[in-house]
Image: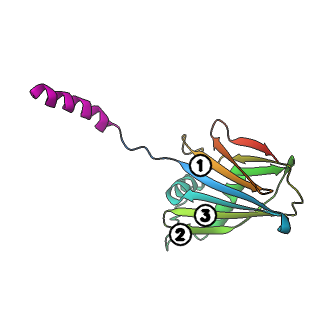
């Protein structure tokens, strides 16, 4: 009986040594709205992850989603997003505007939009957001174009992908 207790003890101790692993993921939805000739982009991140990156990158205390949030948060978010996210349609770089952000529980949503897009035959997406801070960061991209849905998973070693329609 003592042997069983010791065996269980020595089996459990190594398991307790492992700490819970936090997952570093984001979700970006890219949708082409043919009637509006527009591409609408919604990005979803955990607030604490974005805040950590912004605080480090810009050497400020942003205090996202609080009453003490930095007054220039949107300006710095816009700058960061434009530095880390880009896409091409039909081999042409597409400009986009940052429309704003919205908080929901522990998540922040960013809204972007591009206009004057006549058709989409291919899309190339580069998303490096949060990759400088979190080695395990995975950026999922869900793309809705011409009634078809496709998905990309971008990581630090492969932060860009292209799809044809």
- Answer with mark 3 or mark 2, whichever residue precedes in sequence: 2
- As drawn, the residue found furthest toward the left would be 1
Where residue 41 sits: x, y (%)?
71, 60
Q: Reply above or below: 137 against 147.
A: above
Badge 1 crowding class, 10 Å Cα cut-off, few under 14, some 14 to 19, many 20 or more, is many
**The residue stretch that appears in magenta:** 1-18
Q: Nearer the viewer, residue 148 or 79?
A: 148
- As drawn, the residue found furthest toward the top would be 3
- As drawn, the residue found furthest toward the front would be 147
Residue 117's tag is none
Where residue 128 sits: x, y (%)?
66, 46
| Label 2 SS | loop
**Residue at mark 1:** 130
Residue 30 location, quadrant: bottom right
CA distance separating discs 3 and 1: 15 Å
| Label 3 SS | strand
Residue 109's tag is 3
Q: In the rendered view of the protein, which quadrant contains the N terminus?
A: top left
* Residue 2 located within the stretch drawn in magenta: yes
Residue 164 location, quadrant: top right
Where residue 82 sits: x, y (%)?
72, 55
- Answer with mark 1 or mark 2, whichever residue precedes in sequence: 2
Question: Badges 1 and 2: C-beta atoms under 8 Å apart?
Answer: no
CA distance separating discs 1 and 2: 20 Å
CA distance separating discs 3 and 2: 16 Å
Q: Main secondary structure of the magenta part?
A: helix
């Amino acid at each position: 009986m003592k042997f069983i207790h010791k065996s269980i003890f020595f089996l459990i101790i190594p398991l307790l040594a492992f700490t819970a692993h936090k997952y570093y993921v984001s979700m970006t939805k890219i949708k082409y709205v043919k009637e509006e000739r527009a591409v609408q982009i919604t990005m979803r991140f955990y607030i604490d992850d974005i805040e950590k990156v912004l605080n480090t990158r810009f050497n400020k205390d942003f205090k996202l989603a609080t009453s003490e949030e930095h007054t220039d948060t949107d300006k710095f978010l816009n700058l960061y997003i434009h530095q880390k996210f880009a896409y091409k349609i039909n081999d042409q770089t597409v400009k986009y505007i940052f429309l704003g952000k919205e908080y929901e529980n522990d998540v922040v949503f960013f809204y972007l939009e591009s206009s004057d897009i006549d058709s989409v035959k291919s899309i190339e997406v580069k998303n490096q957001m949060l990759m400088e801070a979190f080695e395990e960061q995975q950026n999922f991209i869900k793309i809705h174009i011409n009634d078809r849905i496709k998905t990309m998973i971008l990581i630090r070693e492969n932060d860009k992908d292209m799809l044809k329609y």
